[in-house]
Amino acid sequence: MDSNQAEIDDQQREAAEEKLVNEAFERLLNSYLSSRHRKKVDIITKAFNFARQAHKGVRRLSGEPYIMHPIAVAQIASEEMGLGSTSICSALLHDVVEDTDYTVEDISNIFGAKIAQIVDGLTKISGGIFGDQASAQAENFKKLLLTMSEDIRVILIKICDRLHNMRTLASQPKNKQYKIAGETLYIYAPLANRLGLNAIKTELEDLSFSYEHPEEYEKIKKKLSLTQESRDELFGKFTKPIREALDHMGISYEIKARVKSPYSIWTKMQNKHVSFDEIYDILAVRIIYTPDKKENEVNECFNIYVAISKIYKSHPDRLRDWVNHPKANGYQALHVTLMSKQGRWIEVQIRSERMNDIAEQGFAAHWKYKSGDNEIQEDDAELNDWLSTIKEILDDPQPDAMDFLDAIKLNLFASEIFVFTPKGEIKTMPAGCTCLDFAFQIHTFLGSHCIGAKVNHKLVPLSHRLQSGDQVEILTSKSQHVQPSWLNFVSTAKAKSKIQSVLRRDSRETQKKGEEILENFLQRHDMEITTSTLDKLCKFHDVQRHEDLFHGIGAKTIILGDKDISELQEKSSSKVSWKKYVPFIGGDKKKNKEREEEIRRITINKNFNRKKPVYINEENIRQFIFKPCCHPIPGDDILGYIDNKNEIEVHKRSCPVAAKLKSSFGNRILDARWEMHKQLLFDATVHVRGIDRIGMLKEVTEIISDQLNVNMRKITLSCDEGIFDGQIDLRVHDRDDVKVIMNKLKKIDGLKEVQHII
């Protein structure tokens, strides 16, 4: 009876899953059929049936049939990016070659060369074997960009794949969540932004934020919900006269409220050291109009601007004309900031329906408005310019995958300015770029021999930062050569990669010379170059890599002598050596030091379960490495990272160093948690600023020392024209202590700003 019941249960489950899969595919087809693409339903159905058979019996971590993932990726490609049948088929088949016995040739024979090429590109990104020191994610990213330059759809489908993985990330263990969320913030969200996929970029950022800082995410969501009513009231009052004016003009339009995303709000809170209540641009207004004729699109945009500027005063420095000068990702809109009757600055974004589609769907929307068919148009000059820059960086092999990621990110994140050549040709450049960046953008030879520039006919140095609208003439000299100091002020990926390429070529010659000097030196003392020897010399001369040692010897900044031989001849101590940085105190310093020497670091072996969290408490805290880059204290969201010695570093999840580690060495990330009981003390710094008066300092110290019984290590205060500014170094148990202190200080009369400094 039991076996019969089990059989019936299995059949019912299979039937339910069959229904689930069929309904998901039906939704996909309906989404595709409602688009403007040619209706190639047969090949999509064929791809679905093929993928379904190939993944039969396989499940995701969430327990659902695996085929639900490719369907979901295809759904995003169709509905949220507006892609056609080629992309939908490729999305349905994107895991077949990697996860099953089918080959790219099989895909080509059944579905044609174009779909096979895209699937092959997606497979190459996911595959690959790298050594422990290699950055698998950065290497995959290189492949992604290489295949992207062949067909942009490869990267678009990869972004769809990442978005669905982020939407279903809850089924993964914490360490995997931090890895995937970190990669997403570091690579995929900027990439989506660069391709104009604004809606997807925002969702990727918010999803990553919700896994990395769940408590902060929930707090901001709750505050957004609580302030919804007041925002709606402000929106209604602000837009009422605008609606009346646009109705009077006979314009077909729609007005929407755009609320800042939780991640954007949190980022601003961190960068500006302000609270949620101090952020005033949470609400923006979007006017989306439909021009009566295509040729009137731009005129109508400016007519709306003139009309609303008569109702409200506009901010003179905050007009952004992206209509006549579109961003590199195709974004077009007119941004103006107006003063509401409630005394609040509100940004208004004016877009046509076409501009709005491009803002939300990026390059995908271009194709909808260009050809109407399913073939992607490769004639977008801005996109091709960006891809050619990426290709140049890829053609120049980088020794360090992390350097490569940093170089690409310079281009992904940058906002833009417009610069003119002497002949009046307009060039789009990243904001903050220098004359030298501009020189390298035009030609590598021009950059390599640049000695200065004329900006608006005035002579300026290489490091001069350009502003939008500048006219730039580059000055060169054949005697000029690339200098290492140039890396300190260039900001574009192209300039950095070209400078590094020349410097590496020069450095290789110096290294070779240094290696020969070292080899001769060691031979004279009956020694030879071994890894152990090089490691000892690197440690002795305080350099990180063997290449740095060779370079130092070759450049004569490291002089070899008797001390080097003494160091090499000393017998290795069996005692464990370790870093002395301990970011906390507690009790007697002498005892702490003795205890420090007794305790060994926790080391990770092959049997260590990386999926389980590591707990940091008073007993084991000295077994972890606390790097000074982010100074984590109990209460901070943290993670662990297994370093090259298999010891565990602890970082804040928001630490810039941790961001790189998550993106490049994700398999070494651990879930780390605090388990402290207010026994140890940690360093924290609070910045204060306000209007000076007699007794102010006394009140500050009374609250900290007398009321809260907190130990102050140091107070630094300065006063200028009645405004005082300073910082207080404290000893606290955890982040909660800091919050209590800050909340108390904020109540002091005249104290206007209280911030916690990392």
Image (cartoon, rainbow, N blue to C red):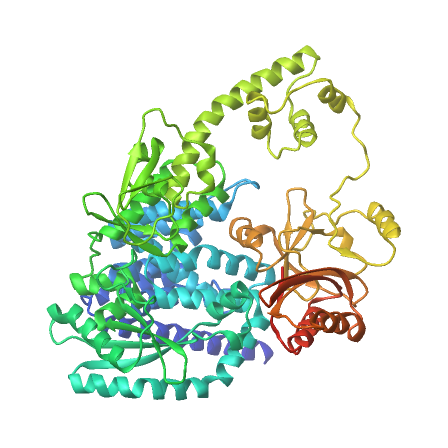
Horizontally, residue 709 falls left or right of residue 393, namely right
> In the current view of this chain or complex, which residue is farthest to the top?
524
Location of residue 188 with respect to 488 vertically, above or below = below
The number of callouts visible is: 0
Horizontally, residue 443 falls left or right of residue 623, namely left
**Residue 588, horizontal then vertical, whole percent:** 88, 55
Q: Nearest the camera: 681 or 345?
A: 345
**Residue 245, horizontal then vertical, whole percent:** 22, 85
Q: Nearest the camera: 638 or 166?
A: 638
**Quadrant of the drawing holding the C terminus:** bottom right
Residue 53 can be seen, yes or no = no
Residue at image coords 46%, 63%: 165
Q: Nearest the camera: 719 or 374?
A: 719
Horizontally, residue 561 falls left or right of residue 47, namely right
Horizontally, residue 43 falls left or right of residue 60, namely left
**Residue 495, horizontal then vertical, whole percent:** 38, 40
**Residue 152, horizontal then vertical, whole percent:** 29, 53
Q: Quadrant of residue 446?
A: top left
